[in-house]
Image (cartoon, grey):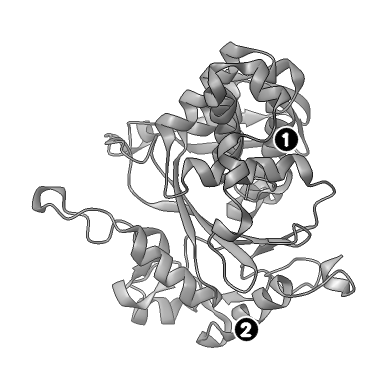
Amino acid sequence: MFKLGPVLKYFFLLIFIVSIIASILFFKNGGLAAALFKPVSVVSKVFTAQDIKSTDGRTNILVLGLDQRSPGSTQGGVLTDTIMVVSIGDNNSNTVMVSIPRDLWVDEIDEKINALYAWNYFPYEGRGRDVKKVQEKVEEILGIPIHYTALVGFSAFKDAITAVDGLDIEVDEAFVDHLYPVEGMENAIPESSRYMTVRFEKGMQTMDGEKALQYARSRHSENFNEAGDFARARRQQKVLVALKDEILSSETLLNPSKISELYEAYKQNVETDISLSEILYFYDMVGSTKNLNVKKIVLSNELKNPNILGSGMLESPTEEEREQFYSGKYVLVPTGRTFEAIKTLVRSYLFCDDSQAECK
């Protein structure tokens, strides 16, 4: 997974990756220099590709980004507004990312998929949140097995950017969002106090952690081109590339203080079933893999376009259908009310080779 940093669709995953890299540098023999100049650890030397979980030569990781500070936080909700699968081929040449929108309807719970993780969450009855249910549903949607999972809180993003002293981001279009949520004010009265206004001017901007988080999370822009979940995703990708470059720069890697802060961001904001041995193995793959061929699929109800992978795979029910079947909510459902087209699309990119046009 950790060779995907430059092109990840949502910001949670890259924070997960680069923070893990930071944790590796932090842990290795207690010495930063040793970590920098000895890329293959003792653990990863004995942990081989045969030890990594996979099916048909691919390892699939489900990443869930929570709408709260960290996986164990009591502030904010427990919705998984980021749902993404990263599939890695064992030959390192074909990596595919698939993003599932939070509004996809789940019949089993009569609710959107972002509510599935915490659907049976009753802490006073001892019933916890359930990653397994999300995993099973994603497997059904995409038609592939999930081998690993990771839960990431949004504070990882802000904390990591703060740790590297901010980022320079090129803003493509100016926009204003008057409905950016204020943390901790979700149920405040009057309702207007729940939101704040954020503004971004066109051009290169220097952003601290808080400003970059606003840029990456905003979705109520008055500018149509910057409004909605898909525009937000494109901005998140841009921030991720800048963050990846900054974290892997010598200025950061040679600064023990920054590495320590990045490790803290990871430790406080990430829960995963990927072991340290597996993390180290994936990390060592980063250094040996160049010119990655990464395909990004975003399942959406946008007009079908061969240049926008995943477009046309979903549709929004009519207003009448929403009232009758979906409690009046805006939801997305698979086109034709079946996941078969999605499965076919995903497999066409998972199991292709470089001789095929779609793999280039």
Residues packed near mark 1 inside 10 Å, few (<14), some (14 to 19) or many (20 plus): some
Q: Position of residue 35 (x, y in %)?
A: 64, 24
Of callouts 2 and 1, the N-terminal one: 1
Q: Amino acid at mark 2?
A: Ala
Residue 214 placement: quadrant: top right
Quick one: 14 or 278, which is closer to the camera? 278
Q: Amino acid at mark 1?
A: Ala
Quick one: 250 or 168, which is closer to the camera? 250
Residue drawn at 67 percent across, 51 percent down = 224
Mark 2 lies on a secondary structure that is helix
Looking at the rendered image, the quarter that the C terminus falls into is bottom right
Residues packed near mark 2 inside 10 Å, few (<14), some (14 to 19) or many (20 plus): some
Q: Position of residue 206 (x, y in %)?
A: 71, 20
Measured in 3D between alpha carbons, the distance from the residue under mark 2 to the one under mark 1, in whole angstroms, is 37 Å
**Mark 2 vs mark 1: in front:** 2
Residue 355 image label: none
* Residue with the mark numbered 2: 341
Q: Position of residue 136 (x, y in %)?
A: 40, 70
| Left/right of residue 158 with respect to residue 323 in the rendered view | right
* Residue with the mark numbered 1: 174
Residue drawn at 57 percent across, 48 percent down = 47
Mark 1 lies on a secondary structure that is loop
Residue 177 placement: quadrant: top right
Residue drawn at 53 percent across, 62 percent down = 53
CB under 8 Å between callouts 2 and 1?
no
Q: Is residue 240 above or below residue 247?
A: below
| Left/right of residue 30 with respect to residue 341 in the rendered view | left
Residue drawn at 75 percent across, 62 percent down = 94
Whether residue 300 is visible to the viewer of this picture, yes or no, is yes
